[in-house]
Image (spheres, helix red, strand yellow):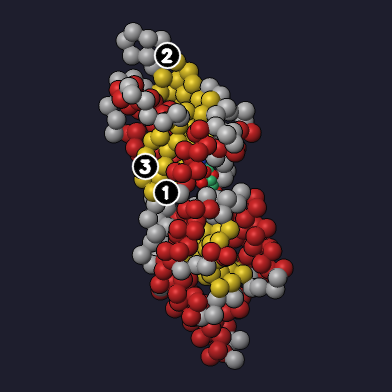
Amino acid sequence: ATPTALLVGTGRAAQLGIVIKGPEILESTRRVDTMVLDKTGTLTEGRMSLAEVLLDGGDSPDRERDDEQRALVLRLAGAAESASEHPIAQAITAATRGADEHSGETVQDFANHAGRGVTATVRVDGGTHEDPTSYEVAVGRPGWLAELGVTGVGEHDPLTRTFRDAEGRGTAVVVAWDGRARGVVTLRDEVKPSAAPAVAELRALGITPHLLTGDNRATAEHVAAEVGIAPEHVTAEVLPEDKLDVVARLQDEGHVVGMVGDGVNDAAALAQAGRRGLGLAMGTGTDVAIEAGDITLVRGDLGTVPAAIRISRTTLRIIK
Ligand code: ADP
Ligand code: MG
C-alpha cells in the first residue's frame, strides 16, 4: 500500500466529516462484516423529552393531590438528575426548569451509577411556613433500585406493572425517595432520519447490523424495527461493563466487528472493537468515546458509517 494513496483515502473521508486516526485503520475498516450500533445518541437523536409522569398506585379520586405528587416526583427527579449528562437526565431537568418555583432545591452527595441511574440528597426549601425538607432520591432501573433496598419495585408490586407497561411505550425510569418507589417517568426519543438508509446501505455492503443498548428490550426492538435491524440481532438491557463482552463474543465467532457509539458507557466496547476491528465514535458524543474510537464521525449523520466502509474499500482496491 502506497502511503500517498492511503492519505488520499483519509483525506477524502475527512471532507465528509470522517476523521480517521491513522491510515492503517482503512485496512480494518475494509474488513468489517458486522456493525454493532448503540441506540441512544447513535441510532436515535439522543435528545429525549418527557412523555409521562405516572404515580405509584395509579390515579386517585383526588386530582389535585395527584397533580401535586406528580409535580414532586418530577421536581425531585429533576434536582437529582441536574448533575448528570445522560439524555434521560437532560430530559427530566429540562421538563422541570420551566416550572413556577416558589422555593429552591439544594443537591448534595450526587452519585452517577453508569447504566443504572443516579442518587442524591435533595433539600427543598419549605417556602414561608414550612421548614426545609431533605429527601434521599434515587432515579433509575427498578432492579437496581431494589438492590439499593428501595421498596415498591418487587415482582408483585403494582408499580412494577406500571413500569413494564410504560416500557412498551418508550424509555422508562422509576423515581424513589426515602426508601420507597413513588412514580415512573417515561421519555421519548426520535430515530435519526439517517438511521434507516444507513442500515440499508450497510446491508448492501454485506455488513450485518446489530443493535446494542442498556435500555429496555421493548424500546430497543421498536427502534430496531424502525431502522431495519433483525430482532435476533438486538441485545438490550446490557450494563456498560457488559457491552464489551457482546463485541468480544461476536469477535470470537470469527467476525470483524465495527462498533458505533457515543457514550461513556460505550467507550470500553469501542476500544474492544478497535483491538480486532474498528471503533467508530459519534463526534456529537462524549470525549471518552471519541478517545476510544479509531474513527470519529464529526456529524451525527449515520450515512458516514457506510461511507467510511466504501472509502476504505475503494482506496485499498486502487492500491492493490
Ligand atoms: P444506552 O445504552 O441506551 O445509552 P445506558 O447504558 O446509558 O443506556 O443506560 C441504561 C439504562 O440505565 C437506562 O435506560 C436507564 O434505565 C438507566 N439509567 C442510566 N443513566 C440514568 C440516569 N441518569 N437516570 C436514570 N436512569 C438512568
Ligand atoms: Mg449512547
Residue linked to disc 2: 132
Residue in the image at 47% along x and 24% along y = 122
**Quadrant location, the N terminus:** bottom right
Q: Residue 92: which quarter of the image?
A: top left
Position of 194 relative to 55 (above/below)? below
Please state the horizontal and vertical placement of residue 13, each as a whole percent of the image: 46, 75
Q: Nearer the viewer, mark 2 or mark 3?
A: 3
Which of the labelled discs sits on residue 50, or is there none? 3
Residue 294 seen anywhere in this rendered image of the structure:
no
Q: Nearer the viewer, mark 1 or mark 3?
A: 1
Residue in the image at 58% along x and 28% along y = 150
Residue in the image at 57% along x and 34% along y = 156
Residue type for callout 1: Arg
Position of 133 relative to 17 (above/below)? above
Which of the labelled discs sits on residue 100, or is there none? none
Residue in the image at 55% along x and 89% along y = 317
Q: Nearer the viewer, mark 1 or mark 2?
A: 1
Of residues 109 and 23, the one drawn nearer to the viewer in this rendering: 109
Of residues 63 and 89, the one drawn nearer to the viewer in this rendering: 63
Residue type for callout 2: Pro
Mark positioned earlier in the residue sequence (1 or 2) = 2
Which of the labelled discs sits on residue 169, or is there none? 1
- Determine whether the residue tagged by mark 3 lies in a helix, strand or loop: strand
Badge 2: few (under 14), some or many (20 or more) residues near its Cα, within 10 Å?
few
**Quadrant location, the C terminus:** bottom right
Real-space Cα separation, disc 2 to disc 3, in angstroms: 27 Å
Left or right of residue 180, residue 55 in this image: left
